[in-house]
Amino acid sequence: MGLQMVVGTKPLYIKVHPSDNTAIVVNDRGVEQGARFDSGIEAIEKIPQGHKIALETVEAGGMIRRYDEIIGYAVKRIEKGSWIKESMLTLPTPPSLENLDIGTNIKEILIEPTKRTFKGFRNSNGTVGTKNILGITTSVQCVVGVLEYAVEKIKKQLLPLYENVDDVVALKHAYGCGVAIQAEDADIPIRTITNLSTHPNFGGEVMVVGLGCEKLQASVITDDAKNILLLQEKTGFQNMVESILEMAEEKLKKLNVRKREDCPISDLVIGVQCGGSDAFSGVTANPAVGYASDLFIKAGATVLFSEVTEVRDAIHLLTPRAINDQVGKALIREMKWYDDYLAKGSADRSANPTPGNKRGGLSNIVEKALGSVVKSGTSPIVDVLAPGEKVRQKGLVFAATPASDFVCGTLQAASGIHLQVFTTGRGTPYNLPVVPVLKVSTRSSLKKEWHDLIDLDAGTIATGEETLEEVGQKIFESIIRIASGEEKTWGDHWGITNDLTLFNPAPIT
């Protein structure tokens, strides 16, 4: 990315590529009419922070360029120095999924590999955990009330007795009954639940609480009857709760003997995601995360990036990075599947971005996608996962998910991430119960406002105080400390989590 930043006396703007005819305003309060930039361009109206200024006059029908890509066409003449608003652009046609280049832009990562280690919990199957958690999976929503009551008792009565266990988490969801269990695409929620139950942070101790009559039988999640507890087999509420506590204590005893040990960075699986994005996302936080991603991949680790609708308009930049024809075709397959999925619901790509994204300066999904994909860094893409599939290869992996924060986080956790890096420009207290979420702000003002929710500030890149490589290195170091249990994210410090949210495109009966 050829980031060009005008950083003399204020006002300030960021221009990503020399061919761009638009830039985003850096100043916290925007710029006033008449403000003159060091380049000589004068704002002919007030322009808010993160919103676009026209660097040249664009005639009606003319191209608006950012990231060296066309993000839209002018609805009417746009004067030089004016505020380019969302309503002034029409969406370009999405990239065709036919005849895309595959494997034509494979780059060597020019970073020295590190021999660093982290402190993890080694599992008997060769995987590594970064937390030591008792995970209790539900097979149906019907049991959630009883399980939540039991988990509260476990945390108060049992957990303090097992000091090496970090937490007890109920993996609750709305699936299991009233669903078309044999329908096409029902495999997505089923494998998500099943894969979550064996997350590396659970130390191999599977525990499933079911009702007994549901369509998703507990035996589908685990084939070991010793790990299943069915409430319809118990005599009353108190017996249900006591039975859950008895099984939980057996698991806690086994988890309590786990100890952290030195593990190579290559054992880590990192998920990257953005939410509450703004126009700074693609020039501060996301490229810094991309640099950290390259650092981890150079060390032999695995990085997952996702959000189909937020990469679809940049697919022509991704297939050239596919390591082979099979991976390239898999990327195209997931884009096509989601195109068809949206069409079934009479939705299209204009439904994204959100109102908050637009307030942050993002005009449309094309601009959002171009800023989103830079979280993936520059490494070759070595594999593609369908929603909820387990990681099976080290390196950079595209894990297909919707863009929804909670659905994406749930699916990435099912794929086996140890930690998620979450970039945000508008701010969100989002956090996952299974893995820590490291939140990185795109703007320094957000970090100041949310000083006890945002973990790292990438807004210093916009003002020239730090380079994206320096912020990327900070992200890399913080991930190692969190994975080792030496540092907590703010979300984990406060103990806040969002519900796991399944992606279920199958019918409900």
Image: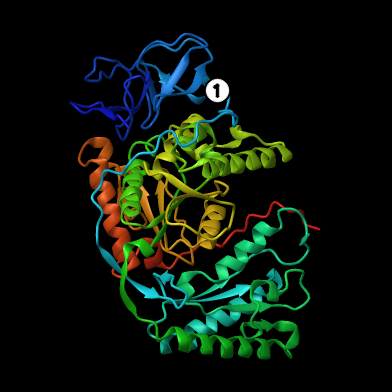
175 horizontally vs 80: left or right: right
Residue under the point 36% across and 41% down = 378
Q: Where is residue 309? Give x, y as percent.
A: 56, 40
172 horizontally vs 257: left or right: right
Above or below, 227 against 18 in this view is below
Residues 117 and 3: in front is 117
Q: Where is residue 282? Give x, y as percent.
A: 38, 37
Residue under the point 26% across and 28% down = 5
Figure disc tally: 1
Residues 331 and 198: in front is 331
Q: Which residue ends up furthest to the left in the rendered image?
A: 8
Above or below, 486 against 83 in this view is below
Quadrant location, the C terminus: bottom right
Q: Where is residue 408? Give x, y as percent.
A: 54, 53
Q: Quadrant of residue 22?
A: top left
Q: Quadrant of residue 379?
A: top left
Residue under the point 34% across and 66% down = 483
Question: Mark 1 belongs to which amino acid?
Answer: Pro
SS of the residue under disc 1: loop
Neighbourhood count class around disc 1 (C-alpha, 10 Å): few under 14, some 14–19, many 20 upward? some
Quadrant location, the N terminus: top left
Q: Which residue ends up furthest to the front in the rendered image?
A: 325
Identify the colour scheme used: rainbow
Q: Which residue ends up furthest to the right in the rendered image?
A: 509
503 horizontally vs 422: left or right: right
Q: Where is residue 218? Give x, y as percent.
A: 69, 75
Reading the image, the residue beneath label 1 is: 92
